[in-house]
Image (spheres, rainbow, N blue to C red):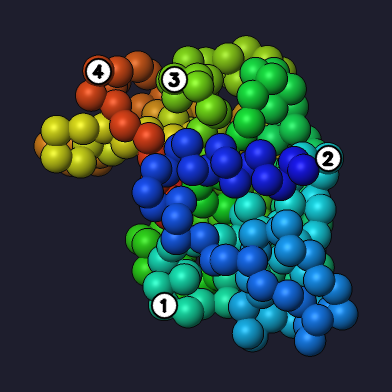
């Protein structure tokens, strides 16, 4: 199944942290279906009107945008409440993430997607973050250097609102990821930025700037970023 491959990709990306994902359990009481192959556990506060396991596009599912180590830690119900938020995530998946996946012919790993207001505040996201509305995702492409991926997406003609190459120095290693967004109701600005956080503080640069020594780069973790994103 595609879902199983996706979680295997998560394990490759996040190492031991991937073991934090909830174990499989029956869904008889929730929806009358038992699926012992799908590794997703419904939050006890879940409202069945919006099922976290729903498909958004050919290769992306809602739960990929809602899972979060921080939300799990604080027992937050990080699932869209509004149909418009789901529609935004579908538009993001169809118009940006699917074309990115096709461009590289590789799995796109979402490290941070939809955020409820409490989660966004806890991880230091911008108060106007597009993550709050289901319009943005932080991603890495399996096996592709993050800066190289950013440059390729810029040259691809994919219709994004923002593409931000984000790099954060943690200790002696860099964490990198891409923030991508899409406005379902438009207009999409096609804005391209680089946001860097290191010993000199935070700064935002125009375009994609290769600021990271790749020998010191490390994979971005879930809930790692988005504080600079609109």
Residue at image location 44% in from the left, 20% down from the top = 145
Locate residue 218: give its quadrant: top left
- Residue of label 3: 145
Q: Which numbered dot is residue 172? A: none
* Residue 115 in view, yes or no: no
**Label 2 SS:** loop
Which mark is first along the chain, 4 or 2?
2
Question: Could you classify mark 1 by the number of other residues whose Cα lies within 10 Å: few (under 14), some (14-19), or many (20 or more)?
Answer: few
- Residue of label 1: 74
Which mark is first along the chain, 1 or 2?
2
Q: CA distance from mark 1 to mark 4?
A: 34 Å
Question: Does the residue at mark 1 contact the one at mark 3 (Cβ under 8 Å)?
Answer: no
- Residue of label 2: 58
Vertical placement of residue 151 versus 178, above or below: above
Locate residue 207: give its quadrant: top left
Locate residue 168: give its quadrant: top left
Q: Nearer the viewer, residue 220 or 89?
A: 220
Which mark is first along the chain, 3 or 4?
3
Residue at image location 32% in from the left, 36% down from the top = 175
Question: Does the residue at mark 2 contact the one at mark 1 (Cβ under 8 Å)?
Answer: no
Side of 182 relative to 179 (left or right): right
Question: Does the residue at mark 4 contact the one at mark 3 (Cβ under 8 Å)?
Answer: no
Q: CA distance from mark 2 to mark 1?
A: 31 Å
Q: CA distance from mark 1 to mark 3?
A: 32 Å
Q: Which numbered dot is residue 215? A: 4
Residue at image location 80% in from the left, 50% down from the top = 56
């Amino acid at each position: 199944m595609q879902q199983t491959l996706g979680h295997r990709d998560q394990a490759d990306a996040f190492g031991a942290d991937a073991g934090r994902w909830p174990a499989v359990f029956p869904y008889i009481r929730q929806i009358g279906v038992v699926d012992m192959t799908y590794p997703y556990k419904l939050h006890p506060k879940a409202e069945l009107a919006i099922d976290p396991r729903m498909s958004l596009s050919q290769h992306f599912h809602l739960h990929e945008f809602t899972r979060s180590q921080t939300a799990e830690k604080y027992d937050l119900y990080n699932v869209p409440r509004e149909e418009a938020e789901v529609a935004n995530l579908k538009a993001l998946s169809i118009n940006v993430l699917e074309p990115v996946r096709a461009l590289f012919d590789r799995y796109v790993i979402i490290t941070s997607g939809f955020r409820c207001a409490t989660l966004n505040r806890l991880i230091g996201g911008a108060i106007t973050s597009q993550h709050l509305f289901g319009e943005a995702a932080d991603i890495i492409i399996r096996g592709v250097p993050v800066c190289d991926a950013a440059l390729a997406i810029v040259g691809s003609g994919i219709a994004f609102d923002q593409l931000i190459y984000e790099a954060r120095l943690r200790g002696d290693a860099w964490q990198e990821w891409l923030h991508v967004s899409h406005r379902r109701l438009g207009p999409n600005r096609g804005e391209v930025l680089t946001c860097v956080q290191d010993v000199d503080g935070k700064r935002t640069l125009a375009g994609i700037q290769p600021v990271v020594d790749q020998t010191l780069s490390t994979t971005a973790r879930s809930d790692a970023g988005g504080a600079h994103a609109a």
